[in-house]
Image (cartoon, grey):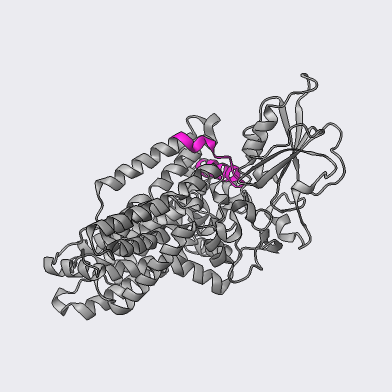
Amino acid sequence: MNVNWLEQRQASSVEEGEVSTAWKPSGGFRAWEWWLTLGCGLVVLATAHQFGVTTDEGVQAEYGELVWRYFISGGVDRRCNELYDLKVYGPLYELISFWAYAWKPEWKFEIRHVVCGLTATLMVPPSVALGRRIGGEVGAVFTALGLLTLPQLIGHSCNNSKDIPTACGFIWSVWALVEVASGPARSFATRDRIITALGPGIALGLTMAVRPAAMLMLNGLLALAWLSHELRERMTQPPWLRSRWGVWSLLATLTIAWSLMVLAWPWARQAPWLHPLKAIATATAFHTAYPVTFEGRLLWSDQLPARYLIQTLAITTPLGTLGIAALGLGIAIVHLIRRPWDDPSQALLLVVAAFVGPILGWTLTRTNIYDGMRQFLFVLPPMAILFGVGCARLVQQGQSPQTRVGAAVFLASLTLWNLGDLVRLHPYQHTFHNAFVGGVAGADDRYDLDYWRASYKEAIEWVNRQPRSDPRQPLRVLVAGHPASRWCADWYKADHVETILMMGPASGPLPPGIDYVVATKRPLLRAVTSIEEARRAGRNAAFRPDQNYADAPVVHRVGRGGATFTVIRGRAATADRSR
């Protein structure tokens, strides 16, 4: 096998010498990644019900329902534009989720989790196809392994209906842009120019219909793909063979994308040009700061250090995956410098930009973010592709078939070793931290772990099993949070359990008539019931809910790997346990 594996791919494409007069997809899909996607879908069906309802899911589901009422009322019912600030978010995915569970509303969140998990599996085909384009079949296999063992993706896969669909649409957009930028030559015909614009336009539009702010990243990639394509054509092709991905194709791409974004978005339909721009401005200058635990200190989401995202990525990625992805990034950059015009370079450039660009952009601008990697999950599929690039180089450096097989087995074993952590943390894989900080136990109280309150499911199910002193009276439980997160516990409580929202700090023993307190360890803003109140809250308004009623004993803890996510206090410490 040739050591110069990227150059080998260029040579093979030159030998073929084919020049087409129409755009044809050349993504290199194979049957096995579709079978792998199907297998992942079956895993989702088996495990989706085990993931808890997260903080935002209740209001997101309500938003989808209100948007549907807007359409069936002919635009008369506009309550969807009055629900917190959700009018600035694209509702397409929430509509799809609503259509999925409308036939069985009593399974609303379980069905939402299935839909979200199935969407996550759709990241596999484009990621693997890009890994194959750059690193051959070896790169494709290791891209799949890297992608499916990333704890942050697995942990968010079933209950993050904003960032998982965004990540899925993002990697499909990268694939579509690579197909156009590095595909065979196209003709001057109007039909071919429209076909050229169709794939990227649909991919970008569907992504922006979920998260409009993705327009900033996607349009940057679109411009980069177009410029690199034009430069490549001028450097490598005579004028009569140059393909034409011209201004009209770009305009058609943007028109298709913008139309899809606005189509199912009631607020944007009122002002199709102005309101999407306002939504993007809101996303890039988010008006509410939230408390963040970082390096053992309580900081605020608009005052995080510039290294926050890079450091968070470094400590929430398995060490082997992180090191090999860094190697793949280095290989990609060196190749782009040495051979900027060959076929793999077009894919490498966009994959590197999709990974580095958003992180570098936040590092320079430091816009208001929180929840670790949650809002940047879309950089993880490109990182998995770079991981595949690094593995392909390491395997193909072998001097004999036996050496290469041995290297492949070792790298596969190193990657699959991560499955142990995924199983031990299930269903809280999003809390994963690597050995840099001592694992999940070392990250406890130093970094945000269960910022979603997904562990309230397990906590309230424990409460459901506790006996009542008086069978005629319900168990009354204080639950820390705010109205938007009430579903985290309420969806799972038994009929004999009554929950009461606790939105501020408190001391002393449990109040009369209260049996338990379920409290997250994540800092919250006191007495916040709306976005407006959060905006007005002072910097001293944060408190730790698990420290409320400190005189009451801890009767149960929910956690994994030596870390505690949620604390339950009661009247007697009869069952102080931690998972």
The residue positioned farthest toward the top in the image shown: 472
Measuring 39% from the left and 40% from the top, which residue is drawn there? 41
Image quarter of the C terminus: top right
Main secondary structure of the magenta stretch: helix
Tell me if residue 2 can be seen.
Answer: yes
* Residue 147 appears in the picture as rendered: no
Residue displayed at 30% across by 61% down? 395
On whether residue 116 falls in the magenta region, the answer is no
Asked if 237 appears above or below 559 in the picture, the reply is below
Asked which quadrant contains residue 518, the reply is: top right
Direction from residue 288 to residue 422 in the image, left or right: left
Q: Position of residue 161 (x, y in %)?
A: 51, 47
Q: Is residue 546 above or below residue 372?
A: above
Which residue sits at x=29%, y=71%? 345
Residue at image point 83% right, 43% down: 549
Q: Position of residue 561 (x, y in %)?
A: 60, 46
| Count of labels in the image | 0
In this view, 461 is above or below 292: above
Question: Is 274 placed left or right of 482 in the picture?
Answer: left
Q: At which x and y percent is residue 522?
A: 69, 51
The quarter of the image holding the N terminus is bottom left
Q: Position of residue 256 (x, y in %)?
A: 35, 59
| Magenta-span inclusion, residue 65 | yes
- Quadrant assignment, res 59: top right
Depth check: 253 or 275 in front? 253
Q: Is residue 575 left or right of residue 283?
A: right
Indicate whether 495 appears above or below 133. Answer: above
Q: Which residues are magenta?
A: 46-68
